[in-house]
Image: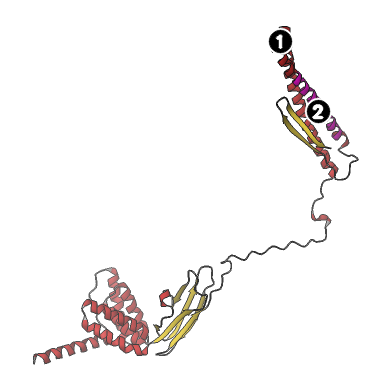
């Protein structure tokens, strides 16, 4: 008699939960927070719309309520709503989650009921399998299914999907994104989708380096560029500048060595009158400075002559066309001589 009474109580309990699932569970106790208050309002609105069979409007209410306050009762109502709305894949996943949570919480009645619905929905599921074409697995590839990112582990796996149209997107750095809409098959069918190789985005990959072709010479145009200055004028300017620099250098060198020569000559005369043993060294030093002074003075006269020549004639001469003055003023330093030298030709 006692056993019969216990079986009757269990049967009544299961019947109660089955009715509660169809009519909508009451929301479990929630923390008294702002989010919990909003979640409770959304839950009640979802129950009202579901009771009016407005499942397309009720399901988003349950979903938002569960997001704010993830209670088991709200999840079961959301799964029941999706099942009634004709979204078996969504309902199957939610019943599966609810069954696991109920078992962890020790709520065996609701856990068993969630499992029964989950198994009943399996025959109504349609599937989608996403694969990659050869060469499509590039670095940084991101695949999204209905705006939700899929991990690489999901590739090639049969994924339960709700009937209807779905969006599949693929993107990667430096590549043009690919987007395609697929229509999930009827219950029990599987749709295989292969994502193509993404094309390079404009400017995303470095362009191949190609030699720049040489410009084709066009017919000469008189006004294309300013006329070059006459060669004689350029030569004249160069000659004047070089001659002036050389003259100045020679004059300065001659003046300095002339002063040094006078000093050394005076030292030699004094040492010679006194019969100083160093008089011969002083004589040699004076002689060296005298020679340098003579060379520099001659160079000053020569460069001054060229300067006058260029200033007076403007540099015109009988030399071959294209000949230019090429003079170089170089410093000269030796153990016995210091000065400058002029090399080249006019």
Taking depth in this image into account, of 245 and 110 the one nearest to the observer is: 245
Q: Which mark is residue 299?
A: 2
Q: Please report contact status of discs 2 and 1: CB closer than 8 Å, yes or no.
A: no
**Residue situated furthest right in the rendering:** 318
Q: Could you say where residue 183 lies in the image, as x and y percent from the top left?
A: 46, 85
Labels 2 and 1: the sequence-earlier one: 1
- The crowding category of the residue bearing disc 2, from other C-alpha atoms within 10 Å (few below 14, some 14 to 19, many at least 20), is many
- Picture coordinates of residue 252, whole percent (x, y): 75, 25
Question: Does residue 201 sit above or below 324 in this rendering?
Answer: below
Confirm whether residue 298 shows in the render: yes
Pick the quarter of the image with the N terminus: bottom left
In the structure shown, which secondary structural element does the residue marked by tag 2 occupy? helix
- As displayed, is residue 79 above or below residue 232? below
Residue drawn 11% across and 90% down?
Answer: 3
How many numbered discs sit on the rendered protein? 2
Percent of width and height locating residue 313? 88, 36
Left or right of 73 on screen, residue 276 = right
Crowding around mark 1 (Cα neighbors within 10 Å: few <14, some 14 to 19, many 20+) is some
Q: Nearer the viewer, mark 2 or mark 1?
A: 1
Quick check: 308 left or right of 30?
Answer: right
Q: Is residue 105 left or right of residue 127?
A: left
Q: Which residue is mark 1?
A: 271
Q: Is residue 340 magenta?
A: no
Location of residue 311 by image quarter: top right
Query: What segment is highlighted magenta in the picture?
Result: 287-310
Residue plotted at (88% across, 45% down): 321
């Amino acid at each position: 008699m006692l056993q019969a009474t216990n079986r009757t109580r269990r049967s009544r309990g299961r019947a109660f939960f089955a009715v509660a699932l169809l009519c909508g569970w009451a929301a479990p106790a929630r923390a008294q927070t702002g989010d919990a208050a909003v979640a409770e309002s959304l839950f009640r609105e979802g129950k009202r719309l579901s009771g009016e069979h407005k499942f397309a409007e009720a399901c988003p209410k349950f979903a938002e309520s569960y997001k704010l306050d993830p209670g088991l009762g709200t999840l079961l109502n959301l799964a029941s709503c999706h099942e009634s709305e004709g979204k078996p894949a969504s309902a199957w996943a939610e019943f599966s989650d609810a069954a696991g949570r109920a078992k962890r919480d020790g709520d065996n009645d609701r856990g068993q009921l969630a499992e029964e619905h989950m198994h009943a929905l399996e025959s109504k599921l349609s599937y989608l399998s996403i694969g990659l074409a050869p060469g499509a697995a590039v670095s940084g590839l991101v695949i999204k299914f209905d705006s939700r990112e899929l991990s690489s582990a999901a590739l090639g796996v049969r994924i339960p999907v709700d009937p209807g149209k779905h969006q599949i997107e693929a993107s990667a750095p430096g590549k043009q994104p690919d987007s395609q809409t697929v229509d999930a098959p009827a219950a029990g069918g599987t749709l295989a989708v292969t994502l193509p190789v993404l094309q390079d985005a404009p400017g995303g990959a470095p362009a191949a380096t190609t030699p720049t072709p040489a410009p084709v010479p066009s017919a000469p145009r008189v006004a294309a560029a300013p006329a070059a200055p006459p060669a004689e004028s350029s030569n004249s300017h160069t000659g004047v500048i070089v001659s002036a620099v050389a003259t100045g250098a020679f004059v300065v060198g001659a003046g300095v060595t002339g002063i040094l020569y006078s000093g050394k000559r005076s030292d030699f005369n004094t040492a010679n009158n006194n019969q100083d043993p160093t008089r011969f060294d002083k004589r040699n030093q004076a002689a060296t400075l005298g020679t340098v002074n003579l060379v520099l003075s001659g160079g000053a006269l020569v460069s001054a002559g060229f300067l006058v020549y260029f200033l007076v004639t403007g540099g015109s001469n009988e030399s071959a066309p294209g000949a230019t003055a090429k003079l170089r003023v170089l410093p000269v330093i030796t153990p016995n001589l210091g000065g400058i030298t002029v090399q080249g030709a006019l």
